[in-house]
Image (cartoon, grey):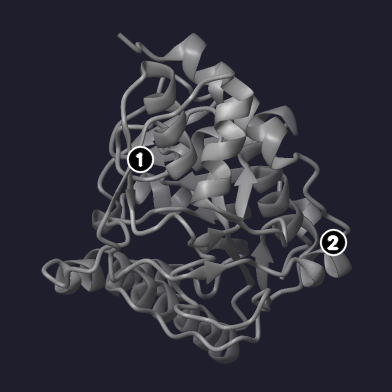
Amino acid sequence: MASVKSYKRAVILGAAGFIGINLANTLAEQGYELICFDRASSPQWPVGAKAIIGDFASLPAELLEALDNALVFHLVSSCRPSPSTAQAAEEVSLDLATTLRYLEATKARNLRWVFLSSGGTVYGQQDSERIVETSSTEPICSYGLVKVAIEKYFALYRTLYGLDYVIARLANPYGPWQHPLRGQGIIAALTYKALKGDTIEIWGDGANIRDYIYITDATQGILAAAWSGKSGEIYNIGTSMGHSINQLIEILGKSLELELKVNYSAARSVDVKRNVLDNVKITAHTGWKPSTTIESGIALTASWIEHNLKLW
């Protein structure tokens, strides 16, 4: 097994998404030979990055070759958290089965996998104030169940073949390049509607608590796990602080100096009441800590949306 520090190449699977774009630019700043893979290219990828365009499920030969002697960031996901099971079989086929094919293809090769799991859906309903990595995994949606299954297969391949990997269970990231109209990312959606003067629609009473992490902190946490995380370990990447949706609305209103219009509707079964990730383990293993307050992060997000998206 090669030293993690010896890898000069980084490959991002699913590089055209919100996290992938930010991670790509951070890796480029670190001087990696960068390969960005997705179904379509992104104009936000850094200059000099090599693009490989294709279908994840087809295991493109060019992509498989690029995985040798690389840090490989697995960000691909075909679905989003949903109470529906209509696409469950497809999720298993596209995400779990395809990932297994990549693990089988790379089990005897030098690389480090960094699998971006879920910091919320894998744990399900928890009573603890902060969730640690050893907390039980009780997913309440197919998305979370598939993530847990992929994690287990990474562990199996390590047991059988010595596969080098770390797993990042990421809290709720937000910030630049997160599009507010794609159904994921409540801070982006709230901020966009507030800037437009639209009514903000909230499922439930707004009391559900989540751990929100600014994207710069999130990418640095992912890289800390990649560079210094112990092989085979799972790391929560969050702030260890929780905020309710109502608190987000209050902070956003103060930041924008606006009176926000809010409408509450019935809660969704897929939403857990509280999810705050304990980050003590990753801090102990790597020294990483988040540094952006929720107030600063929301202000930065609002500024980015104002300057980069068409509001009217």
Q: Is residue 310 above or below residue 48?
A: above
What's the distance in space between the residues labelled 2 and 1, CA to CA?
A: 29 Å
Q: Which residue is mark 2?
A: 286
Residue 199, x across and y down, in percent: 31, 30
The residue located at (34%, 59%) in the rendering is 204
Q: Quadrant of the N terminus?
A: bottom right
Kindly state the secondary structure of the residue where label 1 is placed: strand
The residue located at (54%, 91%) in the rendering is 160
Label pair 2/1, CB-CB below 8 angstroms? no
Q: Which residue is mark 1?
A: 38
Q: Is residue 47 visible?
A: no
Kindly state the secondary structure of the residue where label 2 is placed: helix
Q: Is residue 268 above or below residue 46?
A: below
Q: Quadrant of the C terminus?
A: top left
Residue 99, x across and y down, in percent: 37, 68
Q: Nearer the viewer, residue 117 or 261?
A: 261
The residue located at (11%, 69%) in the rendering is 86
Q: Nearer the viewer, residue 36 or 131?
A: 131
Q: Is residue 97 above or below residue 257?
A: below
Which quadrant of the view contains residue 132? bottom right
Question: Label 2: few (<14), some or many (≥20) within 10 Å?
Answer: some
| Lower position in the chain sequence, tag 2 or tag 1 | 1
Residue 189, x across and y down, in percent: 39, 35
